[in-house]
Image: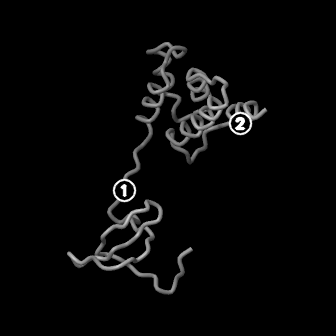
């Protein structure tokens, strides 16, 4: 029963406008891996077929090129993902983009004039000199 629900969920997936090819393929592969863990088969060829049908219209030129140059029934998943990702515009970062990450002050570095800051999302303590303290806020 759970396998059938996962396969139905797989079939209902569609790529969102705000989503990258990597995010969408990761979502599909996550479902496919759950199906495989439960003992059923969901072939890579089925994932390729799903991607070809549900990818956004902006990738239509890439798919047409692939249709003209390769046999789509024999294309590997990685080939398709590489072709789609190369067409996707790279996110360009500006030097004024927000780079700050929340952290917890844990002390001073004894070797240099830097703060020791614990970052929960990476579980690492980093050394930073450019720190802004939000003294009136509480940590969740």
Q: Would you place residue 66 above or below residue 83 in this image?
A: above
Quadrant of the image occupied by residue 94: bottom left
For this orientation, the residue located farthest to the bottom is: 136
70 relative to 124, above or below: above
Disc 2 crowd, CA 10 A, few/some/many (<14, 14-19, 20+): few
- Residue 18 x %, y %: 56, 48
Mark number, residue 103: none
The C terminus lies in quadrant: bottom right
Reply above or below: 16 against 81: below
Count of labels in the image:
2
| Outermost residue, right side | 1
- Tell me the element at label 2: helix
**Front residue of 56 and 139:** 139
The image shows residue 67 at horizontal and vertical percentages of 50, 17
Image height of 7 relative to 89, above or below = above
Q: Position of residue 92 (x, y in %)?
A: 37, 52
Residue appearing at x 42%, y 43% in the figure: 89
User: Which of the two labelled residues, at mark 2 and mark 1, occupies the earlier sequence position?
Assistant: 2
Q: CA distance from mark 2 to mark 1?
A: 35 Å
Q: Nearer the viewer, mark 2 or mark 1?
A: 2
Q: Counting other residues with Cα less than 10 Å from the Cα at mark 1, is it few (<14), some (14-19), or many (20 or more)? A: few
Q: Secondary structure at mark 1?
A: loop
Pick whichever, 31 or 94, lies toward us: 31
Which residue appears at 53% of the width and 29% of the height?
60
- Which numbered tag is attached to residue 9? 2
Q: Quadrant of residue 41?
A: top right
Q: Quadrant of the N terminus?
A: top right
Q: Is residue 46 left or right of residue 132?
A: right
Return the mark for residue 93. 1
């Amino acid at each position: 029963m759970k396998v059938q629900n996962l396969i139905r969920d797989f079939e209902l997936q569609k790529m969102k406008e705000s989503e990258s090819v990597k995010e969408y393929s990761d979502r599909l592969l996550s479902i496919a891996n759950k199906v495989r863990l439960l003992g059923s088969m969901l072939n890579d060829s089925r994932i390729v077929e799903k991607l070809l049908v549900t990818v956004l219209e902006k990738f239509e030129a890439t798919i047409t090129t692939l249709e003209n140059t390769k046999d789509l029934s024999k294309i590997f998943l990685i080939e398709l993902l590489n072709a789609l990702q190369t067409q996707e515009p790279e996110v360009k970062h500006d030097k004024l983009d927000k780079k700050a990450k929340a952290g917890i002050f844990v002390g001073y570095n004894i070797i240099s004039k830097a703060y020791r800051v614990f970052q929960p999302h990476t579980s690492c303590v980093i050394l930073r000199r450019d720190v802004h303290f939000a003294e009136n806020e509480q940590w969740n």
